[in-house]
Amino acid sequence: MKDDPRYLRGARSFVQGRFETVAREVFDDGWTPEERDERELKTSVTIERARSIISHNDSPDVGFSQSINPYRGCEHGCIYCLHGDTPLLMGDGSTKPLADVRTGDVLYGTFRQGSYRRYVKTRVLAHWSVIKPAYRVSLADGTTLVAGADHRFLTERGWKFVTGPRRPHLTTSNKLMGVGAFASPVAKNPAYRLGYLCGVIRGDGLLASHHYERLPLCDVEALIRAQDYLRDWQIETQHFAFQAASAGRRLMHAIRTHARPQVEQIRTLIQWPTTPSTEWHAGFLAGIFDAEGSYSDGILRICNTDREIIDWIGRSFAALDFRFVVEHVDRKIGKPIDYVRMLGGLREHLRFFHRTDPAIVRKRDIGGQAVKSAAELGIVAVEPLGKAMRLFDITTETEDFIANGVVSHNCYARPSHAYLELSPGLDFETKLFAKTNAAELLRAELAKPGYRPSTIALGANTDCYQPIERKHKITRSILEVLAECEHPVSIVTKSALIERDLDLLGPMGEKKLVRVFVSIGTLDRELARKLEPRAASPQRRLDVVRRLNESKVPCGVMVAALIPALNDKTMEHVLEAAAAAGAKEAAYVIMRLPNELKTLFKEWLAAHYPQRAEHVMSIVRQMRGGRENDPNFGTRMSGTGNYAGLMEKRFEIACKRFGINVRETADLDCSRFRPPSPEGQLKLF
């Protein structure tokens, strides 16, 4: 066995990551080592200069709102949520069906600033789908959304699930946040194209003579569209630089034609129609907005000195049911000018952009505007569709996106190595990333005037005391900053290395600034060696529990991960031993198999317990609603069904028997927090 290069590793192969762009050859691998062996695969560590260090979270499954991960390498589950036809608000102001969105696309999400969330551009980090039962969410303004039960939308009272046992979920007393359903664009038929040409040429063009026509603009999108539309009538134009960029002046491009027949034909094309269609009105508004419109500070308006053009703008607005006012301004120099200003706020502005589709992207930027609207977005009904459908979700940098006009949450996280084009198997264990500037970034974050303290979970994604911490000491440097600021922190680990930092943790424990959970899945040494081959032994972890509690550091036990028909039978033994070591708190987590982890675990079962493999997976599927993984918030950690219910009952009885969880645990103390002093500055007292 020791001649096997996978000796003392957990994973059995380089399972293919879903975001890898090249095929990966099958190759044996293992977990990150605590003890070196010349036959083992070597671990590489990449120094990563992170740009931020505190991650924020509002998942109902975890008891913290912010966390720090000194190292990259572990995995989290995902939610699969919305129907593929759901339109998303893209970064250029257009919409795109969720199914068609791709990694790297820019769209709108939100961020909190002051009392409001505000719209901001964000990037898609991941995109995936699954088949699951679907529900229709109907809103008072007619907006409908098709989503999974576990999807979350932003309401006036925070994030809420669609339905099901997870709470809080949507009720008819809730109102979603956003602008409501996006409008559908009109058809870009010949009438639309004639309207566009009429608007953009009358607004900014010059028909100076019978042999010359030019159209100068700062934004080439409108010129390219006008040039394409003119070709529909066999009118060719030449693109040229109309004005060079200089101090106070932008570069301007233009198109032109010198052919007299074509100039005459253009005059005919842009004549005012006698019976304009809806498509012509939409095209005209798009063209005149590209030529003479502006959109800034939440105000959309179109100006011109020609009263006839102003009248047609008003007529077209009315034809598309837009409300507006005309504001007349007399000027000392030049002709009087009229401004046609649209009413109705962001909801109507987006309806204008989507209905008419102007070409210039710059004029469709809604970034920075507050997420507020008078739209009637109250919940009317949440109804099961009675069938399973393919539903889609994405991960974005802001952790949300705008789905058919309402703010929608994305999944919490992805197996990080997969979207780094690395394998969640061997690469996860052998190619690590160390955020060596973590303490520096943390000091800067805590020093910000607006920072409000809440418990930081240290190592929420990966063990903050994994073996490379011995060399890099990033976790210790973070604890030094937190101890200096008297900031509360919680830690979950399976490593005895935490004892190294008792000089920091002890005083913090006495001030109610720290809480630790040691993860112990079984007391069976042989099974533990196979499950976590490079972690501390179960007995050594119990020693850690005892020593931390003796040092006034509150330390409980996390019975995880529990695998049915494998290590769940030892749960009571773990709780009894932990209580004897001084643990007063305990929790448990059922094994989860998101994404590539399913393949890794099946390989591990086949290698170590081939006769039990099918039985184990059968119970896993019973606990996960017939699937191998349940990504739903509220059930993904504990499972569902009879077997999961039995494990929950066993846990409760054992805790009561051994005196664990008998008292409600007090929150850590945030009142002692004080911002850090500038690095290197000496303190007087």
Image: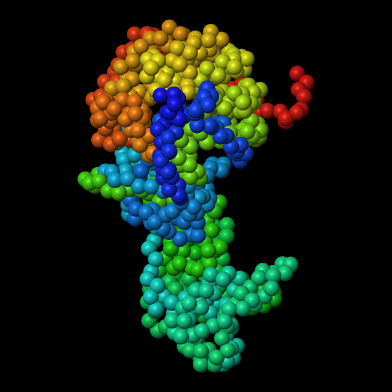
Numbered marks: total: 0
Q: Residue at x 34, y 29 (%)?
A: 607
Residue 451 shown left or right of residue 161 in the figure: right
Q: Quadrant of the N terminus?
A: top left
- The image shows residue 545 at horizontal and vertical percentages of 49, 13
Q: Is residue 685 above or below residue 628?
A: above
Residue 290 shown left or right of residue 617 in the figure: right
* Residue 65 seen in render: no
Which quadrant of the structure image shows residue 481?
top right
Q: Residue at x 42, y 35 (%)?
A: 28
Q: Residue at x 45, y 12 (%)?
A: 539
Q: How is the image coloured?
A: rainbow
- The image shows residue 639 at horizontal and vertical percentages of 31, 29
Which quadrant of the structure image shows residue 577?
top left
Q: Quadrant of the C terminus?
A: top right
Direction left: furthest residue: 386
461 or 146, nearer to the observer: 461
129 or 9, nearer to the observer: 9
Q: Is residue 96 above or below residue 521?
A: below
Q: Is residue 668 above or below residue 327?
A: above
Direction front: furthest residue: 3
313 or 642, nearer to the observer: 642
Q: Residue at x 38, y 75 (%)?
A: 189
- The image shows residue 566 at horizontal and vertical percentages of 31, 22
- The image shows residue 429 at horizontal and vertical percentages of 48, 32
16 or 402, nearer to the observer: 16
* Residue 601 seen in render: yes
